Image: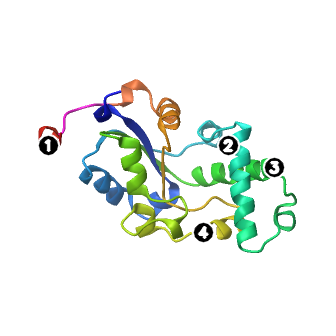
Amino acid sequence: MEPKEEKTIVLIKPDGVKRGLVGEIVSRIEKRGLKIIALEMVWATKEQVDGHYPKDVKWIKRVGEKTMATYDKYGFDPVEELGTDDAEEIGKKVRGWLIDYLTSGPVVKMVIKGIHAIDMVRKLVGNTVPALAEMGTIRGDFSVDSPIAANKGKRGIHNIIHASENFDEAEHELNFWFSPEEIHDYDRAEDDIMF
């Protein structure tokens, strides 16, 4: 694939929308030289969001293991907190919290296109854990939530934004969130200067 043709998905999560950060996020993406080729606000249902998050056991166990590592780091017992120390069971619970979070308000969904769009957007967004996100990134500048606070509250981390992690995820999310008629490609005025 031509590097300039790469596409990725961005979702401004309910906390980002409710905090009025849509314009700031769109501005940062466009200033980076990336194109927004689709954009819409939606209030997704739990059934819709269920298709967004992976259902494979490997992904669910990884989420559970990360959650158990957070409990361990802060000295909390997952059995006491969640009734189990089975990574897959915990991963299923966390997946449910993520669905609840993404359906707690409207989200702004976007298709971003440009040179190495997946990596560029991930760099703009910052680490999933706000405390680890560098200042200057969207999460580093605007999010203060933590995994342990989210886990103790039995909810997803309020980290403002989602960005596809890799090509396969971007492809799945592109087809999941958008139809071809909703995507509008165009030339940016400065394309000839940047490339």
Q: State yes or no: residue 63 in magenta.
A: no
> From the viewer's perspective, is the residue at label 3 or at label 2 nearer?
2
Q: Are marks 3 and 2 in contact (CB under 8 Å)?
A: no
Query: Is tag 4's residue or tag 2's residue first in the polypeptide sequence?
Result: 2
What are the residue bounds of the magenta stretch? Answer: 184-188
Residue of label 1: 190
Query: Is tag 3's residue or tag 2's residue first in the polypeptide sequence?
Result: 2
Q: Main secondary structure of the magenta part?
A: loop
Residue of label 2: 59
State the separation of the CA atoms marked 1 and 2. Answer: 40 Å
State the separation of the CA atoms marked 3 and 2. Answer: 12 Å
Please name the amino acid that badge 4 sits on.
Answer: Ser
Q: Write the residue at 62% across / 36% down.
A: 51
x and y percentages locating residue 187 in the rendered image: 19, 34
SS label for mark 3: helix
State the separation of the CA atoms marked 3 and 4. Answer: 21 Å
Residue of label 4: 146
Q: Write the residue at 61% across / 55% down.
A: 101
Residue of label 3: 89
SS label for mark 2: helix
Query: Is tag 1's residue or tag 3's residue first in the polypeptide sequence?
Result: 3
